[in-house]
Each structure stands twice: as C-alpha cells, then as structure tokens.
Amino acid sequence: MNKRHRIQFPRTESLDHNQDESYFYLDGASKRRKIRFHDYDEIYQVPGLYEQLFYDRLKCSSPGKVTTILESAIKQSADNFTELRVLDLGAGNGMMGEELKKHGISRLIGIDIIPEAHDALNRDRPGVYDAYYIEDFCKLSEEKKEEIESWQCDCMVTVAALGFGDIPTKAFITAFNIIRDEGWVAFNIKDTFLDLSDKTGFSTLIRELIFSKYLDIYHIERYRHRLSINGRPLYYFAVAGRKNADISPDFWVPKDI
C-alpha cells in the first residue's frame, strides 16, 4: 500500500490564477516542493501521489462518468460494449484503463507522451493495457502509426487531458483518424471550452467537430469533474459519439502546435 503524502494547498485568498496554473506543496522528509497540477512527470514519480491528490482530496469522478456515458451511447446501437478495442489517448498511469477494465472491455491500448506515465503504470497497474506506447502524436512516424492501427481500435477515449495544452489538436485528430469508421469516441472537456467566447484552438475544434459530418453525438452531459483547491466544483462536459469518417486536412488547420 502506498504511504500517505503530506499535501498542502496555497491559501485560497491568494488564488487568482487559472485552473491550469494550480499548484500544491508536497512536504517531504528533507524539503518542501512546489508542484503544478499539470507537472505530471513529477507527480507520477511519487507512488500514490496522483491518486491522493486528484481522487482522494479533489474527488475526481471523470473516469467513471466518461465510461458511463460511453456505455449509454453504445446501448443506443447494436454494438457490444465489452467487445470494444479502445485507444486511450493520454492514458497516464492507467486510471481510465482500470475503470474500463472493470467493465470488461476486450482490448486496451494506452498512449501517452510522458515516459514517467508508463513507469507509473508498470509500478501501480501492470497488465491493465494490452499495449502502451510513449509517442508524440504530432510527430507520429508512418511505421509506428501502422503498428498502432494494426490493433484495429474501434473506440477512442481521452479523459482529463484536453484543452490545457496537454494534448494538442493535431494529436487528437491523429488518434481520431486511427480508429475505424463507425467507431466510438468519448472524452471530457471543461464546460467553458464550449462557450463561443473561447477562441482557443481546442475549444474551437471541439465545437466545430460536434456539429460536423465527422461525428454523431449520442450523449452529452454536464457534471462535476472534481473540486478546485478552494473547494469549488469544476464542471466539465462528458461527450460520447460515433465517428463517421476521418477528419480531412482541409477541415482543421491546427492552431496550437
């Protein structure tokens, strides 16, 4: 069992930064470290820290919610949820993979760009994925793309990894195009990213994709993703739909790479 860590959040009255700038202090035996929430490479190196921070302290519910809405979408079709071959983009240390495994998913392929994520997976959740790749999907070689395509994935999921620069739009589109036509797509995104006032690349892509010919939406739901460090709920949308075709190059020119 992983030991409990001494985590301290900054004073709430001093918080005037955005969600992706949030940080915490980790008190160790000899020193205190300041770590940003999105410094996943640092967090993954400490056994149990990711789970304690995001799931125990901040009550993250997204793996369960995205799995549930994916199941709901598939029930509207003749497909079988347990027969899916899932590409988990931004798989991290396997929290989403573990949730899908509980529901009897047939095949799981993990993708991340951070080697520390794979190390943490092997340490904490060995055997969850049938294969796990450390790859930059913005620079994916043709050879590696063909290898990943050979798994014949018919579903892509990505959880708590979109919209803050963690996964660029080009990487998302590459993964989307790897899964087969009529495959399934499920992801979550911060609620404000669907607001027309948000002009960032990923926000614009998702809004256009939802209303495009490339994706049919089966289920969309607003829910509490987790708490902020001062206890306020952070709301996201969970989205599940069916892919109709690969996204063509003329549909989207990446703005964030």
Image (cartoon, rainbow, N blue to C red):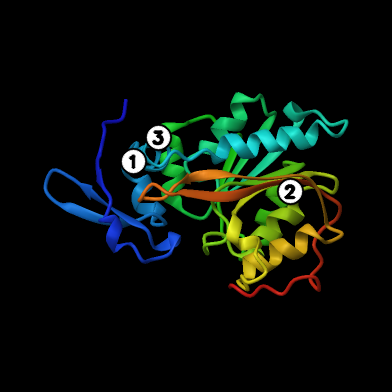
Q: Amino acid at mark 1?
A: Leu
Q: Residue at image x 34%, y 52%?
A: 42
Kindly state the secondary structure of the residue where label 3 is placed.
helix
Q: Which residue is mark 1?
A: 49
The quadrant where residue 256 appears: bottom right
Residue 243 position, x and y percent, is 81, 50
Q: Is residue 23 above or below residue 63?
A: below
Name the secondary structure under disc 1: helix
x%, y% of residue 211? 81, 60
The answer, for residue 21, to whether it is visible in the render is yes
Residue at 59% x, 24% y is 102
Q: Which residue is mark 2?
A: 149
Q: Is residue 138 left or right of residue 217?
A: left
Q: Quadrant of residue 56?
A: top left
Q: Which residue is mark 3?
A: 123
Q: Is residue 152 above or below residue 37?
A: above
Frontmost residue, 123 versus 204: 204
The Cα–Cα distance between marks 1 and 2, rounded to whole angstroms, is 33 Å
Relative image position of residue 202 (x, y in whole percent): 63, 65
Compared across the picture, whether 211 is left or right of 4 comes to right
- Crowding around mark 2 (Cα neighbors within 10 Å: few <14, some 14 to 19, many 20+) is some
